Image (spheres, rainbow, N blue to C red):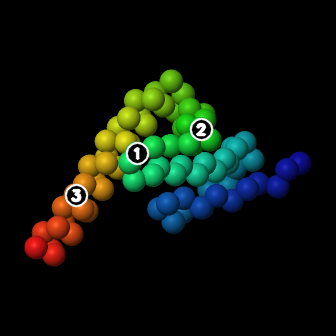
Amino acid sequence: MRKPRTTHRSDGRCVSSTHSKITQHNIIIDVLGGVSRETLHSIKELVGVRADKILLDVQKVVISRTFNIARSFKVLTA
């Protein structure tokens, strides 16, 4: 018999389960919103056919946030 795994949730609670599979995915997106093939594969594994739309949305957020950071530095130094 397998020993139950203890998983720590983000809200601080612990959950024990012998039936769950825990997989870690490292998702790295560069400042221009680009992703590697490995990251694309990980996202497709996580969300399936919606991966392209999700990556496009993430790219928009990353580029927008990068622009806002650059603009705030411009305002601070002007």
Q: Is residue 31 visible?
A: yes
Mark drawn on residue 68: 3
The residue depicted at 45 percent of the width and 52 percent of the height is 30
Q: Do the residues labelled 1 and 2 touch (CB within 8 Å)?
A: no
Q: Position of residue 17 (x, y in %)?
A: 70, 50
Please state which amino acid type lies under the numbered disc 3: Asn
Q: Nearer the viewer, residue 27 or 12?
A: 27
Q: Position of residue 59 (x, y in %)?
A: 37, 42
The residue positioned farthest toward the right in the image shown: 1
The residue depicted at 52 percent of the width and 51 percent of the height is 28
Seen in the picture, residue 56 relative to 8 is either above or below; the reply is above
The residue positioned farthest toward the bottom in the image shown: 77
Q: Which of 77 and 63 is in front in this view?
A: 77
Q: Can residue 46 be seen in this view?
A: no
Residue marked by disc 2: 37
Q: Distance between the residues labelled 1 and 2?
A: 13 Å
Q: Which of 47 and 78 is in front in this view?
A: 78
Q: Specify few, some or many for label 1: CA neighbours under 10 Å numbering under 14, 14-19, or 20 or more.
A: some
Q: Distance between the residues labelled 3 and 2?
A: 27 Å
Q: Specify few, some or many for label 3: CA neighbours under 10 Å numbering under 14, 14-19, or 20 or more.
A: few
Q: Where is residue 66 in the image (x, y as percent from the top left)?
A: 30, 56
Q: Are marks 1 and 3 in contact (CB under 8 Å)?
A: no
> Mark 3 or 2 closer to N-term?
2
Please state which amino acid type lies under the numbered disc 2: Arg
Residue marked by disc 1: 33
SS under mark 1: loop
> Mark 1 or 3 closer to N-term?
1
The residue depicted at 25 percent of the width and 62 percent of the height is 69
Q: How far apart are marks 1 and 3 (CA)?
A: 14 Å
SS under mark 2: helix
SS under mark 3: helix
Please state which amino acid type lies under the numbered disc 1: Gly
